[in-house]
Image: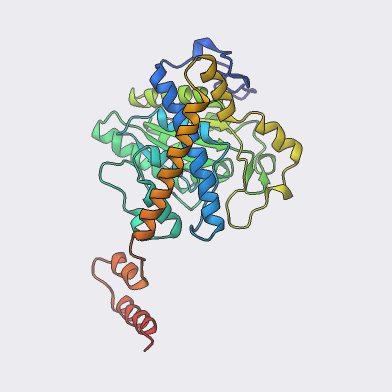
């Protein structure tokens, strides 16, 4: 068995590119063409610009909850790019880029951040669930979706994400165990960025790796360099193909790093991370690494990136403008949508809120 796959012994993370963008693992190079290679670069640059703008909007008070993603683009973009449109994504709260690139409108992502109901109204042709706030709950849900796909005989997979902290939740084990027993077409991706908010991985699990936890569930486990977009793509593509072929689920641990705070809700990463540690990971920046690879192949230029940056800025500005134009959600509206037939108690609450709003 490949040394990248989980066993009770130490494993080595799958890598394809080194930090200088050189191919160091030719045999694992995915079979994608130049246009697809360029699309990966475009999506990572777009996501980095979007993230920078979202952080700024959040600090201006124009968004609600937001979890920054810079540093994790290879893990997020590479994994989603390996899927088919008909596959299902069950995200955590940081995983907005994956559902956006799967078809979820950007303006609705901004509304979701604001807590607006329309932010959760998923278009019919987009196979995603809304980001799960409860840590790890999406793991059990992914197994349920995968069971439904298997019973229908569809060649689809359910892919879900959590962080390293999520791997310490009971739902993580429940979901993987269920998927393993029934050999479900599920892919469980743990984006190990080293910290569950401020808690280091070593303080929440004694396991040598998160990928190793697949052994207990009797499923395939893979560890991958999460700063290498090609390696992430390859790991997830292979896992999805195993799921489609009826070979059961896969647990993938991507070793990555978030450059910013856990969220904009008061987290200060300088209180628990050293400058030296952050500096070491910044040298592994997934965009820098992949940019070097693309430039070496003659597939990318500064001019292309500059144009894409302006395109991304314009797209984000248009999305936030559209979100601003949506009618604000009221509490009575929210109560109406909770029940098919509103209860007497909720009806009374509606009247009270309307009275207060109208100054009665």
- State the scheme by which the image is colored: rainbow
The image quadrant of residue 227 is: top right
Farthest residue in the bottom direction?
A: 360
Pick the front one: 150 or 123:
123
The image quadrant of residue 236 is: top left
Residue 326 appears at what percent x and percent y? 33, 60
From this view, report whether residue 52 is shown above or below residue 347: above
Farthest residue in the top direction?
A: 27
Pick the front one: 204 or 316:
316
Residue located at (34% from left, 67% from top) = 334
Q: How many numbered dots are placed on residues in this image?
A: 0
Pick the front one: 194 or 20:
20
From this view, report whether residue 15 is shown above or below residue 172: above
Left or right of 270 in this view: 172: left
Residue 311 appears at what percent x and percent y? 42, 38
Can residue 326 be seen from the camera position used here? yes
Quarter holding the C terminus is: bottom left
Left or right of 19 in this view: 111: left
Left or right of 283 in this view: 126: left
Can residue 6 be seen from the camera position used here? no
Residue 218 appears at what percent x and percent y? 48, 29
Pick the front one: 184 or 94:
94
Residue 195 appears at what percent x and percent y? 64, 43
Residue located at (46% from left, 25% from top) = 233
């Amino acid at each position: 068995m490949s040394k990248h796959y989980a066993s009770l012994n130490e494993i080595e993370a799958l890598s394809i590119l080194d930090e200088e963008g050189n191919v160091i693992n030719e045999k694992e190079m995915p079979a994608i063409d130049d246009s697809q290679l360029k699309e990966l670069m475009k999506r990572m640059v777009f996501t980095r610009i979007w993230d920078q703008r979202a952080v700024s909007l959040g600090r201006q008070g124009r968004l609600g909850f937001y979890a920054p993603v810079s540093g994790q683009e290879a893990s997020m973009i590479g994994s989603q790019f390996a899927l088919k449109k008909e596959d299902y994504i069950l995200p955590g709260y940081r995983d907005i880029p994956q559902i956006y690139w799967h078809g979820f409108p950007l303006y609705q992502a901004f509304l979701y951040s604001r807590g607006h109901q329309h932010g959760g109204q998923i278009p019919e042709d987009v196979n995603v669930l809304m980001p799960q706030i409860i840590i790890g709950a999406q793991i059990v849900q992914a197994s349920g979706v995968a069971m439904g796909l298997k019973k229908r005989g569809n060649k689809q997979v359910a892919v879900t994400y959590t962080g390293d902290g999520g791997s310490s939740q009971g739902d993580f084990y429940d979901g993987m165990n269920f998927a393993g027993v029934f050999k479900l077409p599920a892919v469980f991706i743990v984006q190990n960025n080293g910290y569950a908010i401020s808690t280091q991985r070593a303080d929440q699990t004694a396991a040598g790796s998160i990928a190793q936890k697949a052994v207990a569930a009797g499923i395939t486990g893979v560890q991958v360099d999460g700063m290498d977009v090609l390696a992430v793509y390859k790991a997830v593509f292979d896992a999805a193909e195993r799921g489609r072929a009826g070979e059961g689920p896969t647990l993938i641990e991507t070793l990555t790093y978030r450059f910013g705070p856990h969220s904009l809700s008061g987290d200060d990463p300088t209180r628990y991370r050293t400058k030296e540690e952050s500096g070491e990971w910044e040298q592994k920046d997934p965009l820098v690494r992949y940019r070097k690879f693309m430039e070496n192949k003659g597939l990318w230029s500064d001019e292309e990136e500059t144009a894409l940056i302006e395109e991304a800025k314009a797209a984000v500005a248009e999305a936030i403008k559209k979100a601003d134009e949506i009618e604000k959600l009221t509490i009575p509206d929210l109560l109406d949508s909770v029940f098919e037939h509103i209860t007497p108690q909720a009806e009374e609450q509606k009247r009270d809120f309307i009275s207060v709003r109208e100054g009665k």
